[in-house]
Image (cartoon, grey):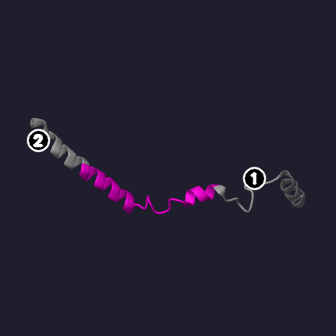
Amino acid sequence: MEIVYLLIPLALVLVVVIVWVFMWAVRSDQFDDLEGPAHRILMDDDEPKIESAEKKEDAAEKDS
């Protein structure tokens, strides 16, 4: 029975910490967009980030 005197305050402290972490996550927009990053992986970019060898050669010829 004496353990209850320890476990009840410990449980209350744990609940307060969990509520505080949840409120921090909501206020810092952690739950703002849950589907955006998943869809972003599937979308192709309009322009390739790596230039092709032909474009580099054309640019070199224009500079000469």
Q: Which residue: 58% across, 56% down?
A: 38
> Is 19 or 45 nearer to us in this picture?
19
Q: Amino acid at mark 1?
A: Ile
Q: Position of residue 47 (x, y in %)?
A: 74, 61
Q: Give the residue pinned by disc 1.
A: 50
Tell me the element at label 1. loop
> Is 40 or 46 nearer to us in this picture?
40
Q: Residues within 10 Å of mark 2 (few under 14, many from 20)?
A: few
Q: Which residue: 33% across, 59% down?
A: 23
- Check if residue 50 falls in the magenta segment: no
> Is 29 or 56 nearer to us in this picture?
29
Tell me the element at label 2. helix
- Check if residue 35 falls in the magenta segment: yes
Checking the image for residue 5, the label placed there is: 2
Left or right of 10? Residue 62 is right
| Quadrant (top left/top right/bottom left/bottom right) for the N terminus | top left
**Magenta residue span:** 15-41
Q: CA distance from mark 2 to mark 1?
A: 65 Å
Q: Position of residue 35 (x, y in %)?
A: 54, 60
Comparing labels 2 and 1, the label whose residue is closer to the camera: 2
Left or right of 25? Residue 58 is right
Left or right of 31? Residue 22 is left
> Is 17 or 2 nearer to us in this picture?
2
Q: Position of residue 13 (x, y in %)?
A: 21, 48
Residue 28 sits in quarter: bottom left
| Quadrant (top left/top right/bottom left/bottom right) for the C terminus | bottom right
